[in-house]
Amino acid sequence: MVNEIKISAIDTGTFGLDGGSMFGVVPKPLWTKAYSEADEMNRIPLASRPLLILESKRKILIDTGNGNKFNEKQQKIYKIDLDKSNIINALSKHNIRPEDITDVILTHLHFDHCGGSTILNDGNLVPTFPNAKYYVQKEQWDWALSPTEKDRASFIRDDFVPLSEHNKIEFTKERGYLTDTIEVIPFYGHTKAMQGVKIHLNDQIYFYAADLFPTSAHIHLPYILAYDNFPLTTLQEKKEILKQAVEEDWIIIFEHDAFVKAAKVGLKDGNYFIKEKIDL
């Protein structure tokens, strides 16, 4: 039976983060060649790319981008255009209204992945998608409520606590299927129980990598975020996923790559490379 599913990348603009933080121990001359030059503040351009899945009667969104609740100082720090980062505006270009969304899968609760999950309505924080359930791993939720000094700045409680207050949270636990075609897989290197999303679409597997592979440059094994709490765990997780991706010809979707939306990956002489770029 052929599954009638449509997948669309949602453009919620770009933002900027420190290039060194994005590539960890990799020297700047190497990451600028692999990805992009940095600006005068050493920031590199990054996409904010949620994914929309239209599946029979369900309209499913993976991540919600940065959102548009940033103050002026934060806008300057992260080079964010609030109009472009507004998930409602972005979805309207696909003829989708907030109330149309039935499910939101949050890979994790860092602000650049779940910032668009809530909005201000008459001064009150409410869920952006009033008819949707928001899915997040229980371990990630608990971590986000009590983060460490290292990663505290990545979690903004206004982005996710109101979801619980409005009874919109559904906890996922470990690996499993949310629908017949959508599977979530927890990872533990970047943050506790970030969930990647594996979409089984007929004979093709799509993998929404979140921050396991934030950009196409990160398919190189040593290219690991300095933001990662457990980088050696990330390294092992990358090896496992890349092996499957090559063997099964997956399409990996890069949430933060400003230049490459998705790609198939190859392996030659022990090194992974972009075999084919894919548009979404």
Image: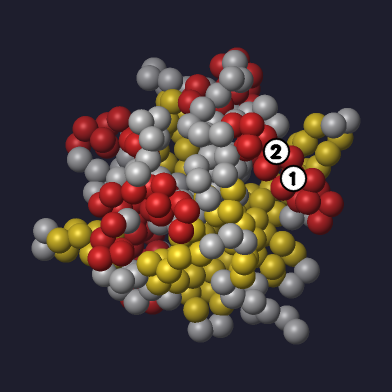
Which amino acid, by three-letter code, is at mark 1? Glu
Mark 2: give few (<14), some (14-19) or many (20+) Cα within 10 Å.
few
User: Which one is in front, 271 or 135?
Assistant: 135
As drawn, the residue found furthest toward the left would be 122
Q: Is residue 6 visible?
A: no
Q: Quadrant of residue 27?
A: top right
Screen quadrant of the N terminus = bottom right
Whole-percent x, y for residue 43 in the image? 43, 26
Q: Is residue 55 visible?
A: yes
On screen, residue 174 above or below 70: below
The residue beneath circle 1 is 240
Identified at 41% across, 54% down, the residue is 141
Q: Which mark is residue 236?
A: 2
Mark 1: give few (<14), some (14-19) or many (20+) Cα within 10 Å.
few
On screen, residue 42 above or below 277: above
Q: Which mark is residue 86?
A: none
Q: Quadrant of residue 260?
A: top right
Screen quadrant of the C terminus = bottom right
Task: Give the total number of marks visible in the rendering.
Answer: 2
Measure the alpha-carbon separation of dots 2 and 1. Answer: 6 Å
Which amino acid, by three-letter code, is at mark 2? Gln
Which SS class for mark 2? helix
Whole-percent x, y for residue 250 in the image? 74, 55
As drawn, the residue found furthest toward the right would be 269
Could you tell me if the residues under marks 2 and 1 are in contact, i.e. CB atoms within 8 Å? yes
On screen, residue 6 above or below 75: below
Whole-percent x, y for residue 255 in the image? 53, 48
Identified at 74% across, 64% down, the residue is 204
Identified at 50% across, 46% down, the residue is 192
